[in-house]
Amino acid sequence: MSVVTVTSGVLQGVDAVPVRVEVDLLRRLPAVCIVGLAASAVKESGERIRSAIEAIGEEFPRKRVVVNLAPADLRKEGTALDLPIALGILAAAELVPAEVVEGVLAYGELALGGELRAVRGVMATALLARSLGKTLVVPTEAASSAALVPGVRVVGADHLGDVVRWLRGEQELDAVPLNEARAEPTGIDLADVRGQHLARRALEIAAAGAHHLLLMGPPGCGKSMLARRLPTILPALGFAEALEVTRVYDTVRGLGTEALVSERPFRAPHHSVTVAGLVGDQTLRPGEISLAHHGVLFLD
């Protein structure tokens, strides 16, 4: 069998960049070799994938399995490449149709028993799949997050065996419909404030002109309370803005966001926050400034 290529993605900041998972089986001593600037979590995936493939009743190839993650100069981190590597190995062993595998973008972690686990960055990966025109295959628990992105076909699965049978045409996996859910509003409003006419006027001017604002006063006079209500008088989030904000939170938290953010974010980091926590770190993980995107950053 020739080299099989499966498409996936890795996170760079709040964006997902495409990664080609190339798998080849060589007639040498059995082993799994993963190359292409892979981090420890990716290199350790070999044993997880072997166990998952055997758990679904398939035989792991008794050959040297060489996995190349291209582009080779891009560092790959996390466990989201488990699923595409497993599908590439199965396709190289002619256990699933290679031409079908090459038409999907796979993204998800594998458990030893073959179960699929969600990872962070699903929304960014859905945007990548849409730009590449590929069907996105993700764990079921992350499918609703991916379905927040319009214009992409999302297929969710609970188990590696379900994906294999779907690729063979033996089982149907329905596409997840577009998720139009919006998160519940917090319920606070600047109209709740009584008095503070000068401060409220300052907030209104700052909101109207997108100005920076300095609130000064003794402890307990209401500075934090007023600042917390500033997002409520800003213009409502548009769909594109809500998608951007939700993608940032999904990239950082990876909690399987199931609804678009409905209100502008408000971030109030502690005064002891580190520089990396405020502006982001060297791995491009977003900091508090990015989490306040399209919203309010309150520094007390």
Image (cartoon, rainbow, N blue to C red):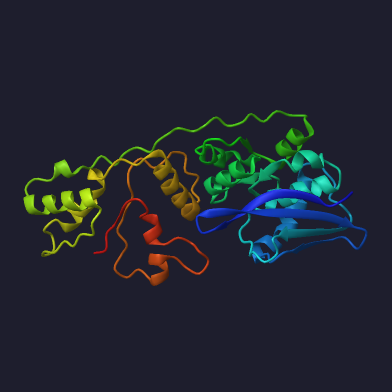
If the image is split into quadrants, where does the C terminus sit?
bottom left
Residue at the extreme front of the image, as rendered: 209
> Could one spot residue 52 in this view of the protein?
no
Is 236 situated left or right of 47 in this image?
Answer: left
Q: Is residue 198 above or below residue 143?
A: below
Name which residue lies at 75% across and 43% down.
102
The number of discs equals: 0
Q: Position of residue 58 (x, y in %)?
A: 82, 43
Q: Is residue 294 above or below residue 66?
A: above
Is 78 situated left or right of 183 in this image?
Answer: right
Is 262 situated left or right of 62 in this image?
Answer: left
Q: Is residue 86 above or below residue 282?
A: above
Q: Position of residue 230 (x, y in %)?
A: 22, 49
Q: Position of residue 295 (x, y in %)?
A: 32, 51
Residue in front for this viewpoint, 270 or 242: 242
Q: Position of residue 11 (x, y in %)?
A: 57, 56
> Could one spot residue 220 in this view of the protein?
yes
Residue at the extreme right of the image, as rendered: 27
Is 108 situated left or right of 186 in this image?
Answer: right
Name which residue lies at 75% across and 42% down.
101
Name which residue lies at 75% across and 64% down.
35
Name which residue lies at 58% across and 37% down.
152
Which quarter of the picture shows residue 173? top right
